[in-house]
Image (spheres, coloured by chain):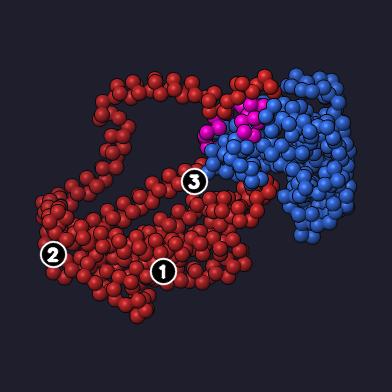
Chain colours: A red, B blue
Amino acid sequence: MTGLSPTQTTGSGEQAPPISRESVTIPPTKAVLPWFKRPAFDRFLQVAAGPVLVIFIWYAAGALGLLNTRLIPPPGATFATTWIALTQGTMVYDLTQTLGRVLWSFAIAAGIGVPIGIVIGANERLYRGAEFLIDFCRSTPATAMFPLFMLVFGLGDEGKVALAAFSALLIIVFNVAYGVLNARKTRILAARSMGAGRIRIFAEVIFLETLPQTFVGLRAGVSLSLVVIVVAEMFIGGMDGMGHRIMDDQMSYNLKDMYGSLILSGALGYCLNYAFLLIERYFVHWAGR
Amino acid sequence: MSDPGTRISDQQSLRRGKIEIRGLTKQFGDSDVYRDFNLDLQEGEFVSIFGPNGCGKSTFINLISGIIPIDFGTVLYDGKTIAQTRLSYVFQNYREALFPWMRAISNIQYPLKILGLDKKTQSLRVEALLAEFNIKIDLNRYPYELSGGQQQMVSILRALITDPEVLFLDEPFSALDYEMTLFMRERLQHVFLKRRNTMILVSHDLEEAVQLANRVLMLTRRPTRIADTVPVDVPWPRDAKSLTSPEFVAIKSRCLEVFSREVARHDSAGAASGSG
């Protein structure tokens, strides 16, 4: 024992040499490949192939006279109009208004929903009791509640945000509660056998254990709140936001701007989802492993 | 030496008590798993528990380690209750027992955090433990980045960090391949010979049960009784070569005899009572 003391090292120290050797040998083999043969470029080609094909068909169908170009303007004109709307018009303002409302409603939903979900999931009797109620509310179309929320919260931003928050809240509560209820028992037993108390087990084991399922709920929640916000912008009084813009374009027959708004709304949803995936991959690096 | 890990285990080796199990009773639903079960074990021994499938081997160590509550009866470690004794547990399924959100090193350190030791003492204890067993695993990785054997080694280190008086192991190597199992058996013997703390191992592999133990406890089907206690007086350490020595083979056949008798007896007597 005493003889070992001077050479005490952690495992990482002993592993260091092979790692450094690896990092010396690998870069040269990578640098040999020209850019168009690298895996990253290949992946980019695969991802880009679908959209390029769709735009080409859109263009070709218009050029061949298969489409009514008054209803579906050609891609070039649509993109040009959208670009002008983005750079000189009010498109960016509408996008940020919608994004702001989505983030507000999501923050409210997550802030309330995660704690409620944990509490409900921790108590099986409470979960059984709440399950039907949550499922019922979740199955009720959010749009059917417009009048109620207009009545309570008025026609301003509050009504839209409250409705979207309510819809996202239910999905988040349900997923978090489900995750807590189905947390792997072994890790809880392990922590208990080390002498961990209830609160510690909750904060340091169950909470982290359910994080992958929580993120499933959060991602579904942010997608749903975008849907509800856009629809709310269309029908509940207001002067901005992507929903309002799309509705306005349709009524004034400004179709190029309408298609552009549709594409950008889609991009907004995609980016939100992707951002959450990145956050998830960072915070829940162990999910599925 | 300012080496907390060794000092504590040196104190430990000075006195050896008894583990006394009295009137242990546990029901699952309507069926008795344990009814008025009594057993004395010597502390500082390596005890293997072997028996037919479903006889309650794992339940036994879950009960006496306090992982699941006892219906009736007492378990005393040198006169102390379960709560007063430092016990550690190594689970069969290391994937579900390690914390995947922590690096391996933090997993090993975690029990000390629960004990409320300060950060400095925590890392000193970890360093001492790693030096003691000359671990060659990159402990800055996450558990899922390690091999099965490495993960179970981390589990064992995590169990050892509190310097437990008794270490329970529930089929710890059953998910590993044979080569890794042989290696891990050697590592575990190394731990036992160094620490001399009480080891209670559940195994479904007779070879493993005999190789690692001072004493093999053979259990019957439910309600569980002791069929036989077989001492293993083979010199330590027992490597792959000792598995084929005549005395080892003789002990193994005696265990197998008891085992076959128990399985046969219950097959004829309790055929109507369904699964064991």
Amino acid under label 3?
Ala
Residue A120 falls left or right of residue A109: right
Which mark is first along the chain, 2 or 3? Answer: 2
Q: Residue at x 76, y 46 (%)?
A: B65
Residue located beneath label 2 in the image: A254
Subunit of label 1: A
Amino acid under label 1?
Phe
Residue located beneath label 1 in the image: A166
Q: Secondary structure at mark 1?
A: helix
Q: Position of residue A96 (x, y in %)?
A: 25, 59
Q: Residue furthest front?
A: B2
* Mark 1 and mark 2: Cα distance apart in space: 33 Å
Q: Which residues are magenta?
A: B124-145
Q: Residue at x 74, y 27 (%)?
A: B194
Q: Are marks 3 and 2 on the same chain?
A: yes
Subunit of label 2: A
Q: Residue at x 49, y 51 (%)?
A: A212
